[in-house]
Image: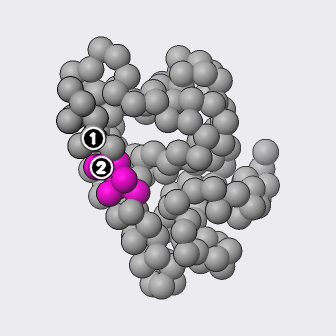
Amino acid sequence: MTNKSAFDTLLRIKKSYKIFNRMDNDDIRSICTDVKFRKYKANEIIFEEGTVDNNIHCIIEGKVSVYTAISFSPIRTLSNGDVFGEISAATGKKRIATLVATSDSVLLQFRFMDKSLNLEALNKVYVNLIDLLSDKLEYANHSTLQI
């Protein structure tokens, strides 16, 4: 698929992804760049812990497992509708986990233009990132309490 068709798909499915809450198509057009589909085979590494990258990934189809340096088994499995990579994309810091496609998967990958002049859209996306990170922290706390 071309970048244009990937971008058109992003606009069509945005309601399925929390990262785009409160954002209209113009907001997304003004801050998203390098939008493309990426296909991964089962057991293919998407990215590794410790690497630096500013891509955000939305799972369109498939499953992705999350591993850390101290885990021998996945600490979490993500699937359709989940978003990952937002922490490193927002902070510029190293990835905190390795992500591996558990099954053949299709991801929509993009970057935010943090130099966008649309400050209102940037504000919306950062509020959405805080919501996503809050959900992930809540999940991690819940998982820790079950141990």
Pointer 1: residues within 10 angstroms few (<14), some, or many (20+)?
few
Name the residue located 42 percent from the left edge and 78 percent from the top edge.
Answer: 123
Q: Dot 1 corresponds to which residue?
A: 142
Query: Picture coordinates of residue 64 (x, y %)?
Result: 51, 30
Residue 67 vs residue 3, the one in the foreground: 67
For the magenta stretch, what is the residue range?
Answer: 132-138
Left or right: residue 37 versus residue 93 is right
Query: Picture coordinates of residue 93 (x, y %)?
Result: 27, 50
Can residue 49 be seen in the rendering of this structure? no
Residue 3 vs residue 73, the one in the foreground: 73
Total marks placed: 2
Please state which amino acid type lies under the numbered disc 1.
His
Q: Quadrant of the C terminus?
A: top left
Q: Dot 2 corresponds to which residue?
A: 138
* Label 2 close to label 1 by CB (< 8 Å): yes
Left or right: residue 70 versus residue 60 is left
